[in-house]
């Protein structure tokens, strides 16, 4: 056979092979998208069912503080509840107890602050991993006390109740919510947008059920970095898995990232960064000495993964700050223990 005819046959074979490969990839892509859609649709149905629950009455506001002295703003950072995580010392009921313990302690500390100056408003930052999820590691479904639907309803209800309580303590409350890696739907290989996240869905259910509260400001969180603004104070709320390999970064790595963001890599002027994810309470200054990175602990205890893979553990705690909105800086810092001790 002449060489030119042989080459023509070979080109036809290559074209057919490419067509077949393309058809196979298209089939796989459709299957992946369909699988992702099934997961998301199931959660959306759960959201609809849960939204039918009876809506609560408006919260009675506190007595207005009429003092003219400059007021500060309470800043609650509540993160990493890991709702439905099951260990020897943690489960959904313990989660509720610890969340309420923080809220009541924060209210008492606020009253102490009020003996010197008004604290009329509060900003609550929900930092992600509010649910435990199902797809983060192979044994996870065996380490929970509730499946996805119950996680969604239980955590959303607890978030709603905590916000309601805050409305009884402060004249106005602002909620800024960030979603975490545990809220991911499906595996990392499933064709599901990152923003279709169970944390975000729990926030949305609680937010919609509190729409009748006129003293509450709460926006949706489609982005994975949230902006916090209290007067002249500006900060970023992140979960903590945005930097590093496989969602883990050393403090120095996060410091370097924070310095780059402040130098212009992130197009919004801010001072501080708030993180969860690492289940630890810590603080690292940024290079200018004014800004800082604040890590906040978790409500969870006895995390085997953190203990065995990173030799890390922490006493359950959440973070409470008070912010001077005129000077644009944090004026007081508290680590609030949540283990009942």
Image: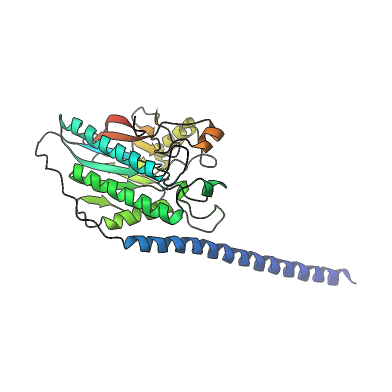
Apparent side of residue 290 relative to residue 111 in the rendered image (left or right): right
- Which quadrant holds the N terminus? bottom right
Number of disc labels: 0
Closest to the observer, 151 or 39:
151
Residue 195: which quarter of the image?
Answer: bottom left
Q: Is residue 246 above or below residue 334?
A: below
Which residue is depicted at the point 87% across and 68% down? 3
Q: Outermost residue toward the right? A: 1
Could you tell me residue 309's position as x and y percent? 56, 35
Which residue is depicted at the point 37% across and 63% down? 49
Residue 294: which quarter of the image?
Answer: top left
- Which quadrant holds the C terminus? top left
Q: Is residue 285 visible?
A: no
Could you tell me residue 203's position as x and y percent? 35, 52
Could you tell me residue 153's position as x and y percent? 37, 54
Which residue is depicted at the point 81% across and 71% down? 9
Closest to the observer, 252 or 178:
178
Which residue is depicted at the point 30% across and 35% down? 320
Could you tell me residue 290's position as x and y percent? 33, 29
Closest to the observer, 251 or 184:
184
Apparent side of residue 36 relative to residue 235 in the rendered image (left or right): right
Q: Is residue 83 visible?
A: yes
Closest to the observer, 326 or 190:
190
Q: Outermost residue toward the top? A: 289
């Amino acid at each position: 056979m002449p060489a030119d005819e042989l080459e023509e046959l070979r080109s036809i074979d290559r074209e057919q092979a490419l067509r077949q490969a393309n058809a196979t990839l298209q089939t796989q892509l459709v299957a992946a998208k369909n699988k992702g859609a099934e997961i998301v649709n199931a959660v959306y149905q759960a959201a609809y069912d849960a939204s039918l629950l009876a809506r609560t009455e408006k919260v009675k506001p506190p007595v207005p503080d009429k003092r003219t002295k400059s007021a500060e703003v309470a800043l609650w950072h509540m993160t990493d509840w890991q709702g439905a995580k099951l260990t020897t010392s943690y489960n959904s009921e313990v989660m509720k107890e610890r969340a309420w313990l923080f809220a009541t302690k924060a209210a008492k500390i606020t009253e102490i602050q009020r003996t010197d100056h008004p604290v009329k408003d509060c900003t609550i930052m929900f930092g992600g991993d509010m649910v435990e999820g199902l797809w983060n590691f192979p044994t996870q479904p065996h380490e929970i006390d509730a499946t996805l639907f119950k996680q969604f309803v239980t955590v959303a209800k607890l978030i709603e109740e905590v916000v309601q309580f805050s409305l009884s303590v402060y004249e106005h409350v602002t909620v800024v919510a960030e979603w975490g890696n545990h809220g991911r739907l499906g595996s990392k290989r499933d064709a599901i947008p990152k923003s279709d996240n169970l944390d975000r869905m729990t926030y949305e259910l609680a937010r919609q059920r509190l729409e009748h509260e006129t003293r509450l400001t709460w926006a949706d969180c489609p982005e994975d970095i949230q902006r916090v603004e209290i007067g002249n104070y500006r900060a970023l709320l992140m979960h903590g898995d945005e930097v590093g390999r496989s969602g883990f970064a050393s403090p120095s790595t996060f410091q370097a990232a924070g310095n780059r963001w402040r130098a212009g890599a992130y197009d919004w002027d801010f001072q501080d960064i708030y993180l969860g994810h690492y289940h630890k309470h810590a603080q690292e200054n940024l290079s200018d000495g004014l800004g800082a990175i604040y890590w906040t602990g978790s409500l969870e205890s006895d995390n085997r993964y953190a203990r065995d893979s990173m030799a890390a553990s922490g006493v359950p705690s959440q973070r409470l700050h008070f912010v001077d909105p005129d000077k644009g800086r944090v004026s007081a810092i508290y680590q609030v223990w949540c283990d009942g001790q």
